[in-house]
Image (cartoon, rainbow, N blue to C red):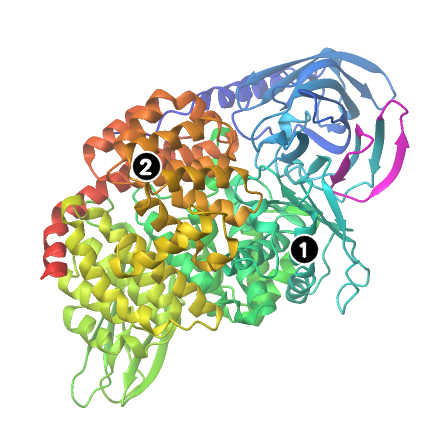
Amino acid sequence: MNLKQKIPGQRTPLLFSLIVLLVAGCTERAAPVPVQPGEPPAGLLGTAVLPLHYRLELTIDPTKERFSGKTSIELSLNEDHAAVWLHGRNLSVAEVYITDADGRRTDATYEEQRESGVALVTFEQPVSKGAATLSFTYDAPFNNAENGLFRIERDGEFYAATQFQPIAARQVFPGFDEPGFKVPFDLTFIARADDVVVTTTPEIALTDLGNGYVRHQFATTRPLPTYLIAIAVGPYDLVDYDTLPTNDIRQYELPLRAIAAKGLGDRLQYALENTDGILNALERYFGTPYPYRKLDLIAVPEGFGGAMENVGAITYDEFLLVMDADSPLRQRRAYTGVHAHELAHMWFGNLVTPKWWNDIWLNESFASWMQNKAANDYWPDGEFDRATLKGALSAMRGDSLAAARQIREPVSRNEDIGSAFDTITYQKGAGVLSMLERYVGEERFRAGVRLHMQRHQDGVATSEDFIESLADGSERMEIGSAFTSFIEQPGVPLIAVSVSCESGEAPRLEVSQSRYAPLGSSIDAAAGSWQVPVCLSFSVAGERDSQCLLLDDKRQSVTLDTKSCPTAVHPNADGAGYYRFALNDDAWRDLLAVANELQATEALALVDSLDAGFRSGVVGADAFLAGMTQLVNHDAWDVADAVIDKLEAIQDIIPVGQRESVHQAFRNIVRPRFERVSEPDDAGSRILRQSLERFLVVIARDPGMRAPLAQMAVARIGLDGEPDPGAVPAEQLESVLTVGVQELGDDFFNALLEQAIDASDPSFRRAAISALAVTEDPALRAILHDTVLSDSLKGTESLGILFQLMASPGGSGQTFAWMREHSGIIIDTIPESFRSGIVPVLGSSFCSNEQADEWQAFILANAEKIPGYERRLAQTLESVSLCAALRDARAPALVNALTR
Ligand SMILES: [Zn+2]
């Protein structure tokens, strides 16, 4: 099956511009021919017209269905133009004209020509090259999901907020909606007198218009791309926090505020109090101050799960911002990590911006890598220090697909921009940065980063620019080709290592590389070739030692700097390399024998490579299980956590009828580790206790543990009286409610659903909704289906339910049938910019080729609503067929090993 479709219109514009060039060449000596429009561009607009400055004035009243605006854009025309291409979507343009440098006005028409928001402005007469100003008067509808300018109703009040990345600014104002066009903006908003108005820069003037509306005028921005502008208008609670003081690096005080829907303002203190320290950590790393004049944090009432690094006005899902010092650890850690990520973007992405979406890794890989550095610096006990490694290991699953993207992947159509925001861009990219940072040394790497920021501040840069800055700043020129081999090629390197020891000679290592391919994969393992910094650790005379090399060939032979033969060779010392490793049976056994003495990073890499070996067919079921049983007892909390993730995932290949006996085996493996963390103190133990409890109770169905939790669930929800929020510690809430749903029938389910819908606490809502979605009762599933179709939940909550229902082996058929019936409404609840990344993936828990075919038919039937679906669908179908191949090849042996 070939899912890659021909890109419509790709060839035509090229031909057309050739013709235009030829015509222009022929008439060189006659009057210049103004640039004619040709076909609407599918991706980049080109550089014949450059924006220089925007002036926006928008009237935003969230109680209305539409907003209205005036936009004027100062431009530079490089040629005479009969028409110009720009971006605009769903805008009803009442008037458009252009004024040249001498003030002469030429009227124009505006027409949207592509669904992705490519529009043509045609002038009544050609306009001469040079400076000009293009002016629009228009109105447009508010969106109802997080995309463009959207409005939300909460308790009878209406709020408006924005999400422009990647290409939704064009739904709010006409312009040149590409990251490469970076210019200043003057922003003015007219709003209801009582509404709070927040945007990118500080407010400089306020004028009462006398009709119930007020004009808010804001300071001119630094040069910015369209996607980084944010606007929030509505009856928000606004909390003015203390101005952040100056420090060694920043000589000016920074005003800090936060806003949230009415009634939530008093739960923003934790976020506000925990901003300065994170920001300082970043300022110390970059050696330059936060680049903007103020900082506002916005809790968006209908945020779509994440956050967005808009300049000076970061938007967050409520779960990430609305909390207190005693909120669950998981929520406070999520805030810290995400907040550090968004603040890191103020440098990576905002101060220096990628020229085009193919280089979005320059934003996301860096922010993901930097967030863990800054979070760890600020909260050393928060367990962020191995987060980049764990992220990189988790990205390897998707990177093992034949349909995996490269970190830097060409983007030729607007429709394909959305699919660039995936785990490859974020987590693999962060892992590769971490590996190369280790290779050149932290200080040298930082020198390269600082040089890059200095060279390109307020401008745009490409991967080549970054690699040049890094090579110059670190004085390590060879870094360029290593970088390129990782960012411009998909896949996980598989490093195979063997040791040979002859008496009287130094031990020799044979190291070779291929591309990792799981069972059933179409990947050509021999095709991959990287420049990999490989470091090995090993034991010699009872001591651990290590040695490094840069593997730039398919195969390399090295002499070890040791006299005696090493044992327990670990091919990824400190887990520093973005690769998996392979060993022969004896070497696996040798390494696993010391697994619990390995440092945590190496144990994490070992868990991953062992699991990968089982999935590729080279590690047997017995060895896999023996290794996992041993590693779950590693002292580091996250090693045990990684093991239970692998066990839970491998359950997918076990037939439903055999799961009960497998669960018994899971309990035997995991229970002893749980007993050891029963008295939590530090953050790691608390996280581990929570996830082990969930595993034992929800996955492995430990009857002894379930009974008391069911009692707690009754008390928490108040089945026998009033709900008692004190009945369950915050960190046990989800497991307790899940057991309640599984054990306590309709009454509990209905009461929990009602309380979830009414709750304002984002943490309770999340736990309750996740618990509700585990129900296996068809009638209760049908209630959840109806709830998703009603608008009583947030979009992300409905989506979370859908993912869980589709992942349930016993009930996904019922949910899929219902999805087919209501596909239009369901897809509409997902913001347009996220659809191509989300909808195709909903089928990823299937595990048979028949289901893959049915899923493909479903997505193709709805393709029009999911532009850019192709890559994620190909990846989903591939992982479904890999699951089927693994099940056919390995399930009997695995069940046998588990139940023996
Ligand atoms: Zn980001």
Report the Cα–Cα distance between label 2 and label 1. 48 Å
Q: Quadrant of the N terminus?
A: top left
Circle 2 packing at 10 Å, graded few (<14), some (14-19), many (20+), is: many
* Magenta residues, start to end: 190-212
- Residue 636, image quadrant: bottom left
The relative height of residue 104 versus residue 177 in the rendered view (above or below) is: above
**Which residue: 58% across, 22% down?**
118
| Quadrant (top left/top right/bottom left/bottom right) for the C terminus | bottom left
Q: Is residue 100 left or right of residue 158?
A: right
Q: Position of residue 485 (x, y in %)?
A: 40, 54
Q: Callout 1 environment at 10 Å: few (<14), some (14 to 19), or many (20+)?
A: some
Does residue 191 belong to the magenta stretch? yes
Q: Is residue 259 left or right of residue 596?
A: right
Residue drawn where x is 29% and y is 79% of the image: 538
Residue 880 is inside the magenta segment: no
- Residue with the mark numbered 1: 455
- Which numbered tag is attached to residue 806? 2
Q: Evaluate whether residue 844 shows in this view.
A: no
What residue appears at the point 36 percent right and 48 percent down from the top-left corner?
740
The one nearer the camera, 76 or 751, is 751
Secondary structure at badge 2 equals helix
Residues 600 and 1: in front is 600
Residue 155's spot in the image, x, y percent?
Answer: 63, 33
